[in-house]
Image (tube, rainbow, N blue to C red):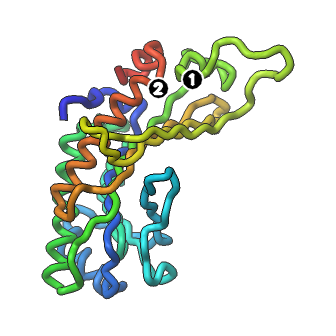
Amino acid sequence: MPVDFDRSSTAALVEVALSVGFEEFHRMLRYELDDLRDQKYAEHFPNDEEKAPHKPFIEEPDGGLAALPSASPITNIRRWFSSEDGSRLVQVQRNWFARNWRATLKSAGNGAVAPYPGYASVRSDFAESLQGLIDFVEGADLGEFKPLQCEISYRFQLGAEGLWDGPGGLDRVARMFAADGGSYLPDLEAMRIITQYAMADETGKRRGRLYGRIETATAEDGSDFLILTMFARGTPDGRRPEDVYAFQDDGQQWIVNGLRDLLTPEALAWYNLG
């Protein structure tokens, strides 16, 4: 894990999520999720919310996406177990698990946002929480952990803050935008774009895909900002938890290095992401 963002990059980096989709634990119902919470997560994640199920996807070699198999998607309950300050989150459903770090004002305790803890810390937290799920499932005889798809995502919020002035100035943020436009269209009012890159290892074997999603947004005070999400998704090389972590380590490097190709040198320095 030789590349990462600086801790002070929290001004732009607002969320990191690691997740894994797996063969469904068909007998993990509401009461089993209650037991999982009580046995593994309640001490550090006292807040408990029920959400609509997440719909994970599997990357296909031709560039398409297939839904992660679920025998009963309507009753596939997703639970959020979060820390008191909301900065740490565990998400569990019968065929998917995620661990999130989120920048929150409460997390620092003094009205400031706590710094990004670093990928090593986020990854360690994910491994610990996932192992808790695996241990519970094995102990309750609910099935065997068989991972099918891994994902890691980073979300950034890039305020204009003098670097750019509205969507028409995005050439100062992302390399893909030309500085000069045509003569007919007015200034860009809004924008949403998704980029896609094949991830391959040193031998040329395809590991998955890296995505970048950039969209403009406007705050309540009228100020402009960009929401930039980069995520890597692919299939682990084996069925062990270590194979999941290995893919996410590769995905993390693709995200960090890919962002430094995606943004301009000026923007990287401005948001302290270089």
Residue sitting farthest toward the right? 184
- Asked whether the residues under the numbered discs 2 and 1 touch, taking CB atoms below 8 Å apart as contact, a structural biologist would say yes
Name the spot of residue 132 as percent of width and height, x first. Answer: 17, 68
Q: Disc number at residue 262? A: 2
Residue 197 lies left or right of residue 139; in this view the side is right
| Element type at mark 2 | helix
**Badge 1 density bin: few <14, some 14–19, many ≥20, Cα 10 Å:** few
Q: Residue at x 63, y 29 (%)?
A: 223
Establish if 241 lies above or below 62: below
Residue to which mark 1 is pinned? 176
Using the image as rendered, state which of residue 160 and residue 256 is in the foreground.
Answer: 256
At label 1, which amino acid type do we have? Answer: Met
Residue 104 seen from this side: no
Using the image as rendered, state which of residue 87 and residue 271 is in the foreground.
Answer: 271
Residue 188 seen from this side: yes
Name the spot of residue 16 as percent of width and height, x first. Answer: 35, 45
Establish if 198 lies above or below 136: above
